[in-house]
Image: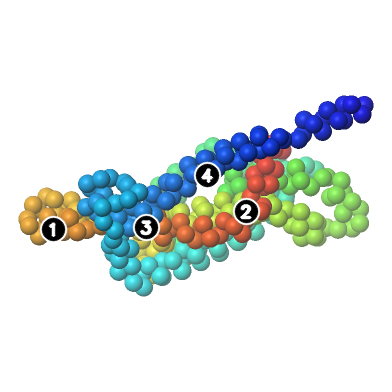
Amino acid sequence: MASRTSTDSRLNVISQSWNFSFIILLAFVALFILIPMLLIIIVSFSSELSIANRGYSFWPEAWTLDGYRFLFKTGDQLLNSYIITIFYTITGTVMSMTVMTMFSYVIAQRNFPLCKSLTWMLFFTMLFSGGLVPSYILNVRYLQINDSIWIFLLPSLVSAWYTIILRTFIQTTIPDTLFEAARIDGAGHFRVFISIVLPLFKTGIATVSLFNVVTRWNDWFIGMLYIRNPKLVPLQTMLTKIQDSIEFLKQNAAIAGTPDGIALLRNLPDENLRMACTIVVILPILMAYPFFQRFFVRGLTIGSIKG
């Protein structure tokens, strides 16, 4: 028995050479991840002529701020879109997590009579959806939430996939005996949810919240489809419209073939503007990620367990 224990201990020990090799491997993986990000930053500061001559390069022929200058010429519109997008993202995530955590708690109760029916209905929406046209008619004609903040909050309030992940978190991390002990002590469902589920559920909430934040932050289609008020245009929609405007101007300048059109074609930022937009969009997510990092790995591990 003692020899078996010592053998297991030796198997759990990593030698210095293997440890060093593993560190080198992780360093190469980190480089493969960081190099594209570094290239995006460099291209955003590259001149359009340099990109046309040499393509994407880590050392361009000329450096410029044209992409950022063109982007920040929008002035208050960029700042307003930033504020609106942050508001949509935070408010929508808080509302979604409140509803989805309560719903996931309900369908995680195996003794609840409607547990299987509600879970099946939730899963059904993952396989079949009404489509774009019925959704547009519902939101515009009946709910009349187009061109308002509610279009960003209500239609995406509940995600079937995230709710199932949250249900799996509850079923795999909180034992049923804990619920039974709380009920014996006289605690109701609301008390159990507030005092037991939420404190033990922080990892799952943080993980799904990060996914929710990224999804909402990157959403440009809703703003493009439903929003006409410039004060309510989110950041991604605004940047998409800027890039579309650049493409339109370049196509018309190329078709015209006049000296002014050719000069406009050369001076308008294109690729560096795209990369500048990418940097502007990705910075808030990069700053938010460290706050979720300590929950993220454990959350993904637990959430991958099939409940």
The N terminus lies in which quarter of the figure? top right
Residue 143 visible within the image: no
Q: Are marks 3 and 4 in contact (CB under 8 Å)?
A: no
Distance between mark 3 and mark 1 Cα atoms: 23 Å
Residue closest to the eye, 143 or 57 = 57
SS for callout 2:
helix
Q: Residue at x 42, y 46 (%)?
A: 36
The residue indicated by pointer 1 is: 263
Q: Which mark is residue 164?
A: none
Label located before the other in sequence (2 or 4)? 4
What crowding class fits label 3: few (fewer than 14 Cα within 10 Å), some (14-19), or many (20 or more)?
many
Disc 4 marks which residue? 30
**Distance between mark 4 and mark 1 Cα atoms:** 42 Å
Residue closest to the far left: 258
**Three-letter residue code for mark 3:** Cys
Question: Could you tell me which secondary element the residue under label 4 belongs to?
Answer: helix
- CA gap, disc 1 and disc 2: 48 Å
Circle nearer the N terminus (1, 2): 1
**Is residue 77 visible in the rendered structure shown here?**
yes
Label 3, secondary structure: give it: helix
Disc 2 marks which residue? Answer: 293
> At 82% across and 30% down in the image, what residue appears?
8
Q: What is the spatial separation of the Cα atoms under label 3 and label 4, in whole angstroms? A: 24 Å
Q: Position of residue 146 (x, y in %)?
A: 42, 61
User: Rounded to the nearest whole Å, what is the CA distance between mark 3 and mark 2?
Assistant: 25 Å
Mark closer to the observer (4, 1): 4
Which element carries disc 1, helix, strand or loop? helix
The C terminus - image quarter: top right
Q: Which residue is mark 3?
A: 277
